[in-house]
Amino acid sequence: MRAGLLQLVFIALGLGLGLVVPEFTRGPVLPSRPVAEMLLATGFGVLGAATVIFSVLFLVVQWAATTFTPRLTLFRDAPIVWRTFAFAVGLTVFCATAALTIANRDEVSVVVPISAGVLLLLLLTLLRTLLLKAVAAIQLAPVLGSITERGRHNLDVLYTGGPEDTHGSGDPGDARGPGGTRGPGDAHGPRGPAGPGGPRSAVCWPKAAAVLQRVDVDLLAGVARAANAVVVLRVTPGTTLQHGTTVAEVYDGELPGSAVLRGLETGAERVFDQDPGLAFRLLADIALRALSPAVNDPATAVQALDAMEDLLRRPARARSREVADRSGVLRVVVPLPAWEDFLRTALDDVIPAARNSPSVLIRLRALLEDLLSAGHDRGEALLTRRLAWVDEELGARFSRLRDALEQERRDEG
C-alpha cells in the first residue's frame, strides 16, 4: 500500500510541476516546438526505465529464491525499487504534461528543458543505486550481512529495550494489571491480570490461514484503555493463524473481538518488522540449501553459521513485550520467542544435514562450545545435548578427525 501511495504522490508531483514550470518567463527562451519534442521523447524514453526496473526485480528475486531461499524477499521489498519506479512514472507525467502545456506557445523559458534534464539525472542516479543494490542482493556476503543486521535490530529493540522500543519488554511473570495484581499463566507464555474466572473473553481468528506479520500495539493499547481492559496475545508475529485459533484473551474489561483483530496485520509470508525468528529461519535455509547433495557447498554453510552465532550471542531473556498506556497501566502483552526457540530453528535442521561435511560439523562444534562459554541462561542443557549430537556425528563418520581434534586440544591445554 505504501508503494502504491508513493507512486500516486509522484504522479501528482509530476502533474503539478508539468503545469507550473512552463509558467516561468524569466531568463533565456527557446522555441517551444523542439522543446516539446524533446520532452515527449524523454518521457517515452523514461518508460524504458520501468522495464529495466521490473527486469532486474524479476531476475534478482528468481536468483535469490533458487540460490538462497524462496523466503528471502529483501530486494523485492527494498524501498529503492519502488521509489525508483515511482520517480520514473512521475518524470514521464512531468514531461508529457509540460509538452502539452507549451504545445501552443511560440517560446518557452530555458527552465523547462533544464528541469527535465535535472530530473533525468536524478533518475539515472536512482537507477545506478538500484543496480548496485541488485548486484549486492545476489552475492552471499551482502545477503548474510543484511539478514544479520535485521535480526540484530529486532533482538535489540524487542529484548533489550533499543532506542526504537518505546514500550519496553520484560518478564511476563512481573506483569501487573490495572489493579496491581500479578497475572495467572504458565511458565512459557504471557500472563494476564488476575480476575474472577480468568479472562473475560477469548478472540479467535475468523478467517482463512494467514501469517501474523505485525501487531499495532498502539491501536490495541488505545482500545484497551477505552474499555479499561488488558489484551494478552497468544500468538507471536511470524505465526501462521489457522481458522479458529485463539489469538488473544481479554482481561478485566469488555472488548469486542473485532477491535482486537484490527490491531493484527496479516499477510501471505513472514516479514522482519516484529519477527526476530525470521533471521534464524533464513540463515538455516541458506545453510540447508548449501548442504544439499545438489549444491554441496559447505563453505557457504559455514558462513551462515558464522552469522547465526553472531545472533545467538545476543541476549533474548524476555518472554513478552508489555505495553502500558500514558498513566502506566498495563494494556497489551505480546509474547516473544525465547532464546531456546532461536537455537532450535538455527541448528536442529542443520546438524543432521551436515553429517557428511566435516568442516560444517567442526564449525557447529565450535559454535556450541563458544555459546557454552558465553553462559546463556536456561540454555546450558540444550547446548550440551546438541554438542553431544555433533560429537556423535563426527565420531560415527570422521573418527580420525575427531581424535585429531581431541589430541590438538590436549596439546594446547
Image: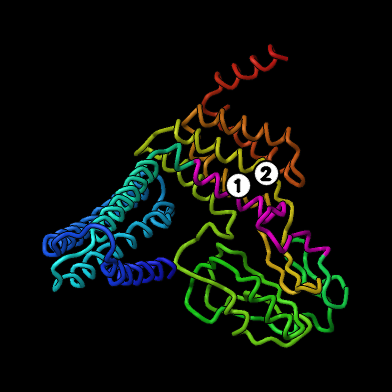
Which corner quadrant of the image does residue 10 belong to? bottom left
Q: Which residue is mark 2?
A: 314
**Mark toward the viewer: 1 or 2:** 1
Q: CA distance from mark 1 to mark 2?
A: 8 Å
Asked whether residue 391 is in view, the answer is no
* Image height of 228 relative to 163, above or below: below
Q: Residues within 10 Å of mark 1 (few under 14, many from 20)?
A: some
- For the C terminus, which image quadrant? top right
Which corner quadrant of the image does residue 388 belong to? top right
Name the residue: 86% across, 70% down: 182
Q: Find the residue positioned furthest to the front.
A: 27
Q: Which residue is mark 1?
A: 152
Secondary structure at numbered mark 2: loop
Which amino acid type is shown beneath numbered disc 2? Arg
Residue sitting nearer the eye, 231 or 8: 8
Residue 377 position within the rendered picture, expressed as x and y whole percent measured from the top left: 77, 45
Mark 1 and mark 2 in contact? Answer it, CB < 8 Å.
yes
The boundaries of the magenta stretch are 145-174
